[in-house]
Image (cartoon, rainbow, N blue to C red):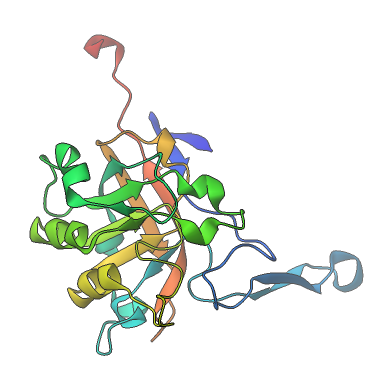
């Protein structure tokens, strides 16, 4: 969905929250119920039951780092900034996106940019194989961090595998690198195909949840201004 704002378009990058929606394996199920009805009470109230990582959300460092900052300690300005979209679509299930593959797109990456990787897997969000999304090689996180990028996003359940390893353990190398460096990870973005590679701004503000490990966000991209007639 695109909305005009003072000559600029806003693209909604957020996954709608709804009962029974896809969640990361083992996370709390999302349920939205009527708590008060207009006909009975004269007003409407809904009861929301969901995990802190439901839908489009941001991972705080405390999500996987023992002494990491909680979501209420994250500076909001980290989640408002210039957006760069890297494209890695058409990938096979569970394939690994390497730094070498992204290299032609990252020459101009600048410190302070919010970098998100479009895999196209947002189209599979409601499918049974949503957990089979491509993953980022740890070197991608290492190289982006080295360039001063502190916020990395993906259009899938996770930049790491959403299934355990053969021995049953969870391996989250990208989380450990990014969150361990005090950075943030945004997951389950959508509609990235409607955003140019550069020139947009991302706004993805979390709820104020003291001490918690993450939060759903309403992520939007503010597209570059349209050229004026004099500029055409």
Q: How many marks?
A: 0
Q: Is residue 221 above or below residue 174?
A: above
Depth check, front residue: 124 or 78: 124
Report the quarter where the C terminus lies. top left
Residue 214 sits in quarter:
bottom left
Q: Is residue 172 left or right of residue 90?
A: left
Q: Is residue 134 above or below residue 216?
A: above
Q: Is residue 75 visible?
A: no
Residue at the (61%, 54%) spot, across then down? 126
Residue at the (16%, 56%) spot, across then down? 144
Q: Is residue 179 visible?
A: yes
Depth check, front residue: 174 or 191: 174
Residue at the (16%, 37%) spot, across then down? 104
Question: Furthest-bottom residue in view?
Answer: 66
Residue 37: x %, y % from top left: 84, 69
Residue 151 sits in quarter:
bottom left
Question: Furthest-front residue in view?
Answer: 166
Residue 87: x %, y % from top left: 31, 40
Residue 213: x %, y % from top left: 39, 80
Q: Is residue 225 left or right of residue 51?
A: left
Depth check, front residue: 158 or 181: 158
Residue 75 sits in quarter:
bottom left
Residue at the (20%, 61%) spot, across then down? 141
Residue 131: x %, y % from top left: 50, 62
């Amino acid at each position: 969905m695109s909305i005009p704002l003072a000559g600029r378009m806003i693209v909604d990058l957020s996954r709608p929250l709804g009962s029974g929606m896809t969640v990361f394996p083992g996370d709390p199920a999302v349920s939205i119920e009527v708590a008060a009805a207009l006909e009975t009470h004269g007003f409407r109230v809904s009861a929301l039951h969901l995990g802190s990582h439901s839908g489009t959300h941001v991972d705080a460092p405390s999500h996987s780092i023992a002494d990491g900052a909680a979501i209420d300690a994250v500076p909001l300005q980290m989640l408002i900034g210039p957006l760069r979209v890297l494209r890695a679509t058409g990938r096979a299930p569970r394939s690994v996106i390497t730094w070498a593959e992204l290299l032609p797109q990252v020459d101009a990456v600048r410190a302070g940019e919010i970098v998100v990787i479009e895999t196209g897997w947002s189209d599979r969000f409601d499918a049974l194989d949503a957990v089979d999304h491509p993953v980022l090689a740890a070197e991608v996180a290492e190289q982006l961090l080295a360039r001063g990028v502190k916020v990395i996003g993906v259009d899938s359940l996770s930049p790491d595998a959403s299934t355990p390893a053969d021995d049953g353990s969870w391996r989250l190398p990208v989380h450990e690198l990014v969150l361990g460096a005090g950075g943030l990870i945004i997951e389950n973005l959508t509609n990235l195909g409607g955003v140019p590679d550069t020139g947009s701004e991302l706004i993805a503000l979390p709820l104020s949840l003291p001490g918690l490990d993450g939060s759903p966000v309403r992520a939007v991209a503010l597209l570059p201004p349209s050229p004026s007639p004099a500029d055409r």
